[in-house]
């Protein structure tokens, strides 16, 4: 995702196989759990390159095709970390805040033919989350979520499916939190 040439080649392959693209879900994300004062330059660059620059590369290439074709939907995975600060994730937080404003700016520039939204999950029990947190840490996080648990990936997927559908046709420029009430 961070390599523009590889992204371009991938979209060329999509053109060959499918003849275009109607919906893009830009779902890149890595994180490095580290205090702000200990973030290394190479970690900062890698997180921003994947989480923000990679999303930009994919979204721009998809948007060009969608504008030429007369429409489409671009959905980006941001995070509640892009809406409110969380310690130990300064690089991740900054990248996801960037994704939100990238989505909102694109929504303004590409309307009315291309809709662009950012989905902002809170804690989701993904392999990345399970690898970073011990069972005790997971339980501590769950205790701070009003619904008392992490989201399941399919719950987040359901929102993406809705936003990509005709039923979600009036959503553009939104940053939608899916967090069990955590930031409320």
Image: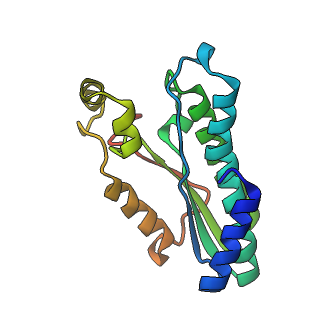
Q: Quadrant of residue 147?
A: top left
Q: Position of residue 30 (x, y in %)?
A: 53, 41
* Residue under the point 24% across and 29% down: 135
Q: Position of residue 134 (x, y in %)?
A: 29, 27
Q: Nearer the viewer, residue 129 or 65?
A: 129
What residue do we see at 39% from left, 60% from top?
157
Q: Is residue 111 visible?
A: no
- Residue 30 visible in the displayed image: yes
The x and y percentages for residue 41 are 70, 25
Vertical position of residue 129 compared to residue 9: above or below:
above
Q: Quadrant location of residue 22?
A: bottom right
Q: Is residue 78 above or below residue 171?
A: above
Q: Is residue 34 left or right of residue 125?
A: right
Side of 55 where 136 appears, left or right: left
**Residue at x 33% of width, y 38% of height:** 130
| Colouring method of the image | rainbow
Residue lying at the far top in this picture: please name it: 37
Q: Position of residue 21 (x, y in %)?
A: 62, 77
In the image, taking residue 87 as reference, residue 103 lies left or right, namely: right
Of residues 135 and 168, the one nearer the viewer is 135
Quadrant showing the N terminus: bottom right
User: Total label count?
Assistant: 0
Q: Quadrant of the C terminus?
A: top left
At 75% across and 57% down in the image, what residue appears?
4
């Amino acid at each position: 995702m961070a390599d523009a040439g590889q992204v371009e080649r991938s979209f060329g392959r999509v053109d060959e196989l499918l003849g275009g693209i109607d919906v893009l879900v830009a779902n890149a994300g890595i994180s490095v759990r580290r205090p702000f004062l200990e973030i290394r330059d190479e970690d900062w660059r890698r997180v921003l390159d994947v989480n923000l620059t990679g999303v930009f590369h994919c979204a721009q290439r998809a948007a060009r095709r969608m504008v030429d074709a007369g429409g489409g939907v671009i959905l980006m995975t941001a995070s509640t970390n892009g809406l409110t600060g969380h310690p130990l994730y300064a690089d991740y937080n900054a990248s996801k805040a960037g994704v939100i404003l990238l989505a909102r700016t694109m929504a303004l520039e590409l309307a009315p033919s291309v809709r662009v939204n950012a989905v902002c999950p809170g804690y989701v029990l993904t392999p990345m989350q399970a690898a970073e947190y011990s069972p005790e840490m997971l339980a501590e996080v769950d205790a701070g979520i009003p619904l008392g648990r992490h989201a399941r990936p399919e719950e987040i997927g359901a929102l993406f499916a809705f936003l990509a559908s005709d039923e979600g046709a009036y959503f553009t420029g939104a940053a939608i939190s899916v967090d069990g009430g955590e930031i409320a």
